[in-house]
Amino acid sequence: MIKNIKLVSLGVLASALCAVALIGTIHAQSAPMTDAQIARIRLNCVSAKNTIAQLHASDALLRVNRGQIYESMTTKLMTRFNDRASSNHYDISGLTLAIQNYNSTLTAFRADYQVYEEQLSSALTIDCTKEPVAFYDAVSLARTQRSQVHVDVTKLNQYIDDYDTVLNVFISSEVTGK
């Protein structure tokens, strides 16, 4: 399941990079855009907006599915196991720390995704034939925010792995009686 999540993450990231590539490569944010770059954005406006709209739709579905998986991991698996082990008077301090890290990152994921989604929606409302620089800036900001969502996803996957490691140590110590 974790491999599927990682593959989906890579696919979504690749889609975003393709959308930005349609707009064109612009070297630095602080450097003013050339007339050629502006013309390229205007020329590819419809294609770029269609690609970004498709990305927006697929990301929304992915966010719901991924969010449900992440939520299930914490509510149906981690928290329930921790509660059961705690009620049986086991030391679950390592498991508790792992789930706290996971839950705080899950909260950050939700917030960061919301900011990204709003920025992408905002970019789609800009008429790139009339305001190509504003459109580029909006897409660029959305890409940065999407990168943060990717960081959150990577952390969540790491915390799942961390929880698994701590759980295996917990189980082996309880089986051997140490």
Image (tube, helix red, strand yellow):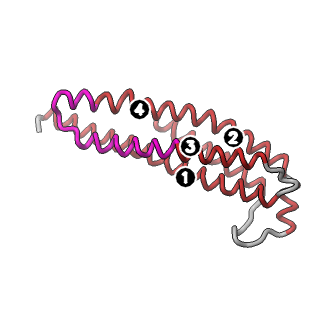
Q: Which residue is mark 3?
A: 9
> What residue is shown at x 82% (from left), y 46% (from top)?
47
Select label 2 or label 3 by which is in front: 2
The vertical placement of 147 against 168, above or below, is below
Residues shaded magenta: 82-110
Helix, strand or loop at disc 3?
helix
Alpha-carbon span between mark 4 and mark 3 = 17 Å
Judge left or right: residue 39 versus residue 137. Answer: right
Q: Is residue 4 positioned above or below 158 on the image?
A: above
Q: Quadrant of the C terminus?
A: top left
Label 2 secondary element? helix
Name the residue tied to disc 4: 73
- Looking at the image, is mark 4 or mark 3 earlier in the sequence? 3
Point 37% across, 46% down: residue = 101
Q: Seen in the image, is 66 located left or right of residue 162?
A: right
Q: Magenta span: helix, strand or loop, mainly?
A: helix
Position of 8 with respect to 73 (left or right) is right
Compare marks 1 and 4 and give the one earlier in the sequence: 4
Q: Mark 2 highlights which residue?
A: 56
Give the mark, 1 or 3, whose residue is nearer the N terminus: 3
SS at mark 1 in the image: helix
| Dot 2 amino acid type | His
Residue linked to disc 1: 148
User: Magenta segment: does it hold 144?
Assistant: no
x, y percent for residue 128: 83, 53
Q: Amino acid at mark 4?
A: Met
